[in-house]
Image (spheres, rainbow, N blue to C red):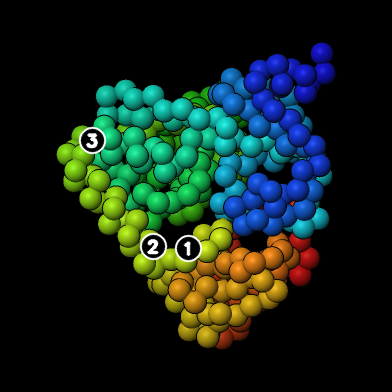
Amino acid sequence: MEKYDIIIENGASICYNRRGDSISALKTGGRIKVIIKPTSIKGLIIALENTCDDRVVLGYMTNALISDKGIDKEVVLTSGVRGVHIDENKLVCAAGESLTNVCVIARKFGLSGMEKLSGIPGSIGGAIAMNAGAFGGFMVDIVESAKVFHDGKIIEMSKEQLGMSYRHSSLLDSGSVIIEATISLTPNNPLIIANSMKNARSKRQQTQPLEVSLGSVFKKTEDNGAGYYIEKCGLKGCRIGDAEVSTKHANFIINTGKCTSNDYYKLMCHVKHIVENECGITLQREVRLIGEFEE
């Protein structure tokens, strides 16, 4: 049996030569050779077992920039691998479950710890791999362990083994893929949790743009957020093509209409260059680049 037949037999869908802009959060990107979308944890494991080692694994692509040249590799999308199991004060989440939905479930069952993460887009797997966070709350604060696909095997990794730090984890270095994760929370009054989540979402809406974007472009520096330096250099509103530095929050680049990945990339590089020249600060990219890009 061909490998794609095996993958399909286990519930995944496969499509060929689909454009990245049809699935990217930024609405940009060129042709993708093969997209495999499993719909269960078992299906995800089968997909990983039957694809090449240089495959690309993506979730909701809320911080991934797909090249306009496309991706000439197999892409495995985890966004269809969903499900949450409640075990007392713990939530066992499939890798592709949305962080937003997990926050809703935590609130519903009176489990506290995710309040500051409310409103962050993306999957559980991606959020852990990047140690997503906001307003002083991070995934590392609540993750207990994760089942990971590593070198063809499923292994259990503790929080310590995941090596989570600011916008980083050991998974990014090893190429390992989260299959399922356990989050440990604390019982609290659902009304208090709901109010805290509402405040976090409200703060996010007041301080961050609502337009199409990939979230924060650059990581926070040791002393200030990247947006401080970008704004200091007068770069708010700076444009290349239809990519624009947000006038609401300088560390966001928004798609104002027909932005291409190249527009975004060139503007990102321009911003980094200006900040380095004028402030002596080398900004570190937070957005993940998928495919080939040229200066």
- Can you see residue 256? yes
Side of 146 relative to 88 (left or right)? right
Q: Check disc 1 and report the residue beneath it.
A: 210
Left or right: where 5 falls relative to 149: right
Amino acid type, callout 1 = Leu
Query: Which SS class for mark 3?
Result: loop
Q: Between residues 126 and 221, which one lies in front from this camera angle?
A: 126
Contact, CB < 8 Å: mark 1 with mark 2? yes
Checking the image for residue 15, the label placed there is: none
| Res 129 seen here | no
Identified by mark 2, the residue type is Gln
Residue situated in front as seen by the camera: 143 or 127: 127
Q: Is mark 2 on a helix, strand or loop?
A: helix
Marks 2 and 3, how far apart at CA: 24 Å
Q: Residues within 10 Å of mark 3 (few under 14, many from 20)?
A: some
Q: Residue 205 carries which label?
A: 2
Q: Where is residue 156 in the image (x, y as percent from the top left)?
A: 48, 26
